[in-house]
Image (cartoon, rainbow, N blue to C red):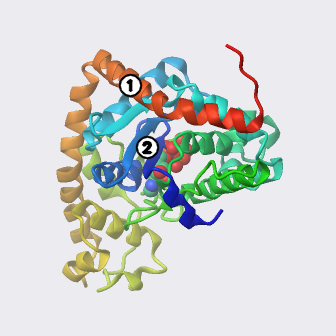
Amino acid sequence: MSETTNSRFTPRIFSGIQPSGGLTLGNYLGALKRFAALQGDQAQTIYCVVDLHAITVWQDPETLRRNTREATAAFMAAGVDPARSVLFNQSQVTAHAELAWLFNTVARVGWMYRMTQFKDKAGKNSENASLGLLAYPALMAADILAYQATAVPVGEDQKQHLELTRDIAAKFNHDYKVEHFPITEPLIEGVATRVMSLRDGTKKMSKSDPSDASRINLTDDADAIAQKIRKARTDADPLPGSIDGLKDRPEARNLVNIYAALADETPDQVLARFEGQGFGAFKPALAEVAVAAMSPITAKMSEYMADPAEIDRILGKGAERASEIATPILERTKDIMGILRSR
Ligand code: AQP
């Protein structure tokens, strides 16, 4: 099936975030901010806290429950409106897990072993990783294709998983001679598709990095943000007049990109103002921009978190709406595969 035949599907955008820790500035700039901006475009937007993905590595049960609510609060604080988007947690819509099993029979083992995220997370002791960690991309394909989603906004790090979703859809359509699943388009846009660690400009900023200083958490207060930026690793050279001059300076490039994304400017616009200056001048300016952008989000998150029952109600309602879309698609998938149901 060619990509142009996606036009036969209702335009739908799906994306998710794992509640595997507190969310970071990387999650905000690479995902949440864009999720909010995509609402109200032509496509229906469906956003999910992917708790079944989070448990592919060990999660303390009480912490997982809290992180699921906190991620939901972060979605809403970043501007995702549960009235305009479908917002829910993955495990409350059983179509995800059911379709994932069906896709486990479509995907090949070799495809899974090639995933760099599996290699990174499983590390040297991959025999001891959970089977779920290996099968993670089949569940991700199910998340997306349970809604026949035509587009998925993600950060750069998820590109390989999305390609695997496309491979699963194409193989299913080919094997069963149908055009049941779209070949979903990745939406990887903007200057912050890959926000890097504040301690190492070659590593992605990640919520599960052991070093808290490596990231800005969405729950950090103004002092913590300013302190982390002050201590961020940089170099001693002055800033150049354009981003091309930062090719071999990953830490400097990361801070300039973060500034640009937070201020809704291009990196070159930022550098035009700071050309010739060092980090002694740039870091306090970045801290100011970061605090101004993040403080209202942190404040709204704590307001939402003060009423966990309301968060649970929103997730439940969202799950009902999500289920209404996903169930007929799952049922049709079972029909295509010859799965008999008699009740
Ligand atoms: N550093 C980042 N820069 C830009 N985008 C990012 N995303 C994550 N980190 C960055 C985007 O956020 C969305 C949700 O990602 P996720 O939480 O499901 O998993 P992840 O990509 O594995 O994020 P983490 O923080 O690194 O989680 P852990 O540490 O649990 O593995 C995705 O769209 C992702 O691209």
Q: Report whether the residue tagged 2 is closer than 8 Å to ligand 1.
A: no
Is 12 left, or right, of 130 in this rendering?
Answer: left
Position of the C terminus, as image quadrant, is top right
Circle 2 sits in a helix, a strand or a loop, which is it?
Answer: helix
For the residue marked with disc 1, what is the amino acid?
Leu
Give me the residue at 46% from left, 71% from top. Answer: 250
Give me the residue at 61% from left, 40% from top. Answer: 142
Dot 1, crowdedness within 10 Å: few (<14), some or many (≥20)? many
Of discs 2 and 1, which sits in the foreground? Answer: 1
| Residue annotated with mark 2 | 212
**Lower sequence index among marks 2 and 1:** 2
Residue 274 is situated, as x and y percent measured from the top left of the image, at 22, 78
Say whether residue 20 is visible.
no
Query: Does the residue at mark 2 contact the one at mark 1 (Cβ under 8 Å)?
Result: no
Circle 1 sits in a helix, a strand or a loop, which is it?
Answer: helix
Q: Quadrant of residue 236?
A: bottom left
Position of the N terminus, as image quadrant, is bottom right
Say whether residue 258 is visible.
yes
In the picture shown, does residue 331 fall above or below 261?
above
| Residue annotated with mark 1 | 315
